[in-house]
Amino acid sequence: MDVAAELPLQIYPNPVTDYLIIGTNSADESGLQLLIFDSSSKLISEISGCFNNEIRLPRELTNGNYIVQFRDKQNQLQRKSIMVIR
């Protein structure tokens, strides 16, 4: 079984209000899967999108810290912490 490589990316702005942008050096900038977990590791939302575009966060996300996990078409992974302020 292959171990997924780490996906090189940056997310901004952080803290997040309504949307986030994912910046990467990846040649393929489509097919992003974004999973959002709360502080107890419960899956809150699953969003598909593209790199370098605004990704709107669900309105039900309240103020707090969340973990976002990104996966691209090559199954590369990255986990980041974000703070939501609304």
Image (tube, rainbow, N blue to C red):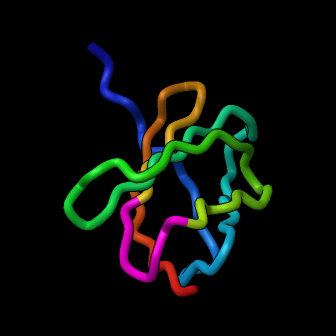
Instruction: Give the side of residue 77 with respect to residue 86, left or right.
Output: left
Relative to residue 23, is residue 7 depicted above or below? above
Residue lying at 41% horizontally and 63% vertically, measured from the top left: 80
User: Which contiguous range is marked in magenta?
Assistant: 60-67
Quarter of the image with the N terminus in it? top left
Is residue 60 placed above or below 34 in the rendered structure?
below
Query: Is 37 on the left-hand or right-hand side of 26?
Result: left
> Outermost residue, right direction?
53
Q: Please state if 24 lies on the left or on the right of 86 as rendered.
A: right
Q: Residue 75: horizontal and vertical position, in percent?
A: 48, 28
The vertical placement of 19 against 76, above or below, is below
Task: Where is residue 69? Give x, y as percent.
Answer: 43, 50
* Number of numbered discs visible in the structure rendering: 0
Residue 20 location, quadrant = bottom right
Magenta segment includes 56 = no
Q: Nearer the viewer, residue 82 or 78?
A: 82
Instruction: List the single residue furthest toward the top.
Output: 1
- Is residue 55 placed above or below 65 in the rendered structure? above
Identified at 44% across, 57% down, the residue is 68
User: The C terminus appears in which quarter of the rendering?
Assistant: bottom right
Q: Nearer the viewer, residue 68 or 74?
A: 68
**Horizontal arrangement in the rendering, residue 43 relative to residue 76 (left or right):** left
Question: Residue 83: x percent and y percent?
Answer: 45, 79
Residue found at the very far left of the displayed protein: 40
Q: Residue at x 77, y 56 (%)?
A: 52
45 and 76: which one is in front? 45
Of residues 11 and 67, the one nearer the viewer is 67
| Residue at 54% in and 84% down | 15
